[in-house]
Protein backbone atom coordinates (compact mmCIF):
# COMPACT_ATOMS: atom_id res chain seq x y z
CA UNK A 1 0.00 0.00 0.00
CA UNK A 2 2.89 2.34 0.61
CA UNK A 3 3.96 1.76 -3.03
CA UNK A 4 0.63 3.18 -4.23
CA UNK A 5 1.01 6.32 -2.11
CA UNK A 6 4.55 6.83 -3.39
CA UNK A 7 3.43 6.42 -7.00
CA UNK A 8 0.58 8.92 -6.52
CA UNK A 9 2.76 11.54 -4.87
CA UNK A 10 5.36 11.13 -7.62
CA UNK A 11 2.68 11.50 -10.29
CA UNK A 12 1.29 14.55 -8.58
CA UNK A 13 4.74 16.09 -8.32
CA UNK A 14 5.36 15.49 -12.00
CA UNK A 15 2.05 17.09 -12.87
CA UNK A 16 2.79 20.09 -10.69
CA UNK A 17 6.22 20.44 -12.25
CA UNK A 18 4.89 20.13 -15.80
CA UNK A 19 2.16 22.68 -15.07
CA UNK A 20 4.66 25.14 -13.70
CA UNK A 21 6.98 24.60 -16.68
CA UNK A 22 4.08 25.09 -19.07
CA UNK A 23 3.38 28.54 -17.65
CA UNK A 24 7.02 29.67 -17.68
CA UNK A 25 7.28 30.46 -21.42
CA UNK A 26 4.13 32.58 -21.26
CA UNK A 27 5.48 34.57 -18.34
CA UNK A 28 8.83 35.04 -20.05
CA UNK A 29 7.14 36.18 -23.26
CA UNK A 30 5.31 38.95 -21.42
CA UNK A 31 8.62 40.39 -20.23
CA UNK A 32 10.25 39.96 -23.63
CA UNK A 33 7.74 42.24 -25.34
CA UNK A 34 7.85 45.04 -22.80
CA UNK A 35 9.39 48.08 -24.45
CA UNK A 36 12.27 49.79 -22.67
CA UNK A 37 11.66 53.43 -21.74
CA UNK A 38 12.56 56.02 -24.37
CA UNK A 39 15.21 58.67 -23.69
CA UNK A 40 14.88 62.43 -24.17
CA UNK A 41 16.06 64.18 -27.32
CA UNK A 42 18.51 66.25 -25.26
CA UNK A 43 20.19 63.13 -23.84
CA UNK A 44 21.14 61.92 -27.34
CA UNK A 45 22.35 65.34 -28.61
CA UNK A 46 19.42 65.59 -31.02
CA UNK A 47 19.96 67.97 -33.97
CA UNK A 48 17.39 69.50 -36.31
CA UNK A 49 19.62 68.60 -39.25
CA UNK A 50 21.80 65.75 -40.53
CA UNK A 51 25.29 64.79 -39.34
CA UNK A 52 26.93 64.18 -42.67
CA UNK A 53 25.03 61.34 -44.33
CA UNK A 54 23.60 60.15 -40.99
CA UNK A 55 19.95 61.11 -40.72
CA UNK A 56 17.06 59.69 -38.75
CA UNK A 57 15.50 58.61 -42.05
CA UNK A 58 18.34 56.14 -42.72
CA UNK A 59 18.76 54.99 -39.11
CA UNK A 60 17.73 51.51 -38.04
CA UNK A 61 15.81 52.96 -35.06
CA UNK A 62 13.62 55.31 -37.13
CA UNK A 63 9.95 54.39 -37.38
CA UNK A 64 8.21 56.14 -40.29
CA UNK A 65 6.55 58.52 -40.44
CA UNK A 66 7.87 60.38 -37.38
CA UNK A 67 9.11 58.36 -34.41
CA UNK A 68 12.12 56.51 -33.03
CA UNK A 69 12.37 53.26 -31.10
CA UNK A 70 14.66 54.85 -28.48
CA UNK A 71 13.99 58.61 -28.48
CA UNK A 72 10.89 60.43 -27.19
CA UNK A 73 8.81 62.87 -29.18
CA UNK A 74 8.20 63.49 -32.85
CA UNK A 75 11.24 62.78 -35.03
CA UNK A 76 11.79 64.14 -38.53
CA UNK A 77 13.59 61.91 -40.99
CA UNK A 78 15.94 64.83 -41.77
CA UNK A 79 17.21 65.13 -38.17
CA UNK A 80 20.01 63.20 -36.44
CA UNK A 81 21.46 62.26 -33.06
CA UNK A 82 24.47 60.50 -31.56
CA UNK A 83 22.84 57.05 -31.31
CA UNK A 84 22.41 56.68 -35.09
CA UNK A 85 22.68 53.05 -36.24
CA UNK A 86 23.19 51.91 -39.82
CA UNK A 87 20.33 50.01 -41.44
CA UNK A 88 20.51 46.23 -41.36
CA UNK A 89 21.67 44.76 -44.62
Image (cartoon, grey):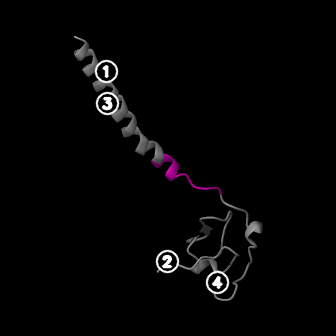
Residue under label 4, please give it: 54
The label shown at residue 14 is 3
**Real-space Cα separation, disc 3 to disc 1, in angstroms:** 9 Å
Specify the segment rendered in magenta: 29-37
Q: How far across and down, in percent of the image, does residue 67 sit?
A: 61, 67
Count residues near mark 1 (Cα–Cα under 10 Å), then give few for <14, some for 14-19, many for 20+.
few
Where is the N terminus found, in terms of image quarters? Answer: top left
Of the two numbered discs 1 and 2 in the rendering, the one whose residue sits closer to the viewer: 1
Foreground residue, 64 or 38? Answer: 38
Marks 3 and 1, the one that precedes in the sequence: 1
Of the two numbered discs 3 and 2 in the rendering, the one whose residue sits closer to the viewer: 3
Marks 4 and 3, the one that precedes in the sequence: 3
Res. 10 image quadrant: top left
Name the residue: 66% across, 65% down.
Answer: 71
**Real-space Cα separation, disc 1 to disc 4, in angstroms:** 64 Å
Marks 4 and 2, the one that precedes in the sequence: 4
Of the two numbered discs 4 and 3 in the rendering, the one whose residue sits closer to the viewer: 3
Foreground residue, 18 or 52? Answer: 18
Residue under label 1, please give it: 9
Res. 70 image quadrant: bottom right
Amino acid sequence: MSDTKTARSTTFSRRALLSACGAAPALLAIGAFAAPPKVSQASVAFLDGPRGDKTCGNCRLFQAPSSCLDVQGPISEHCSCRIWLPPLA
